[in-house]
Image: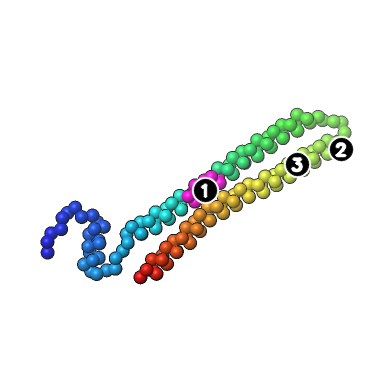
Amino acid sequence: MARQPESDSFLDMFSRFGRDLKLPKVDAQAILDHHRKNLEALEKSARASAAGASSVLSRQHEMVQEALSEITRMAQNYQASGNPQELMTKQVDFARKSFETTLKNAGEVADLVRKSGTESIEILRDRIKDAMAEIRAGYDKK
């Protein structure tokens, strides 16, 4: 048996070994393309998740700023009156507005998180569907 040149790549040695054993041909490029697409989908999904997290943090920052502005405005307009009923009405109004704002903000943040998660999962779900179609197409060729 003739000595093979030492410059053969690992892939070339495996290919030659497969031919010698009469193993079915493996399309290495198709395998690499398949995994490249998987990695691209993971990267795209991670970017979508990061963008969603960034928008949630940005919106929460805006909400805190709005709340602080509202509290400051109410504190500046607050004047203690001698009427306990009027004082109680102001406190109840402040508590009600705070509660309503908190509920609205929590709902908005939950919606942002849901949209971000859905987008990220859809990217992966689409890649899984495509991967399954690629695998089926590979078996249909045989």
Q: Nearer the viewer, residue 107 or 130?
A: 130
Which residue is drawn at the image coordinates 35% and 56% (left, top)?
32
> Which quadrant: the C terminus?
bottom left
Q: Which residues are magenta?
A: 44-53
> What label does residue 85 carry, if any?
2
Give the label, 3 or 2, closer to the camera: 3
The image position of residue 20, as x and y in percent, is 21, 67
Q: Nearer the viewer, residue 78 or 107?
A: 107
The image position of residue 76, as x and y in percent, is 75, 29
The image position of residue 5, as x and y in percent, is 15, 55
| CA neighbours of label 2 inside 10 A, class few (<14), some (14 to 19), many (20+) | few
Dot placed on the residue nearer the N-terminal end, 3 or 2:
2
Amino acid type assigned to the residue bearing label 3 in the image: Lys
| CA neighbours of label 1 inside 10 A, class few (<14), some (14 to 19), many (20+) | some
Magenta span: chief secondary structure: helix
Mark 1, residue position: 48
> Real-space Cα distance between discs 3 and 1?
34 Å
> Real-space Cα distance between discs 1 and 2?
52 Å
Q: Is residue 90 above or below residue 36?
A: above
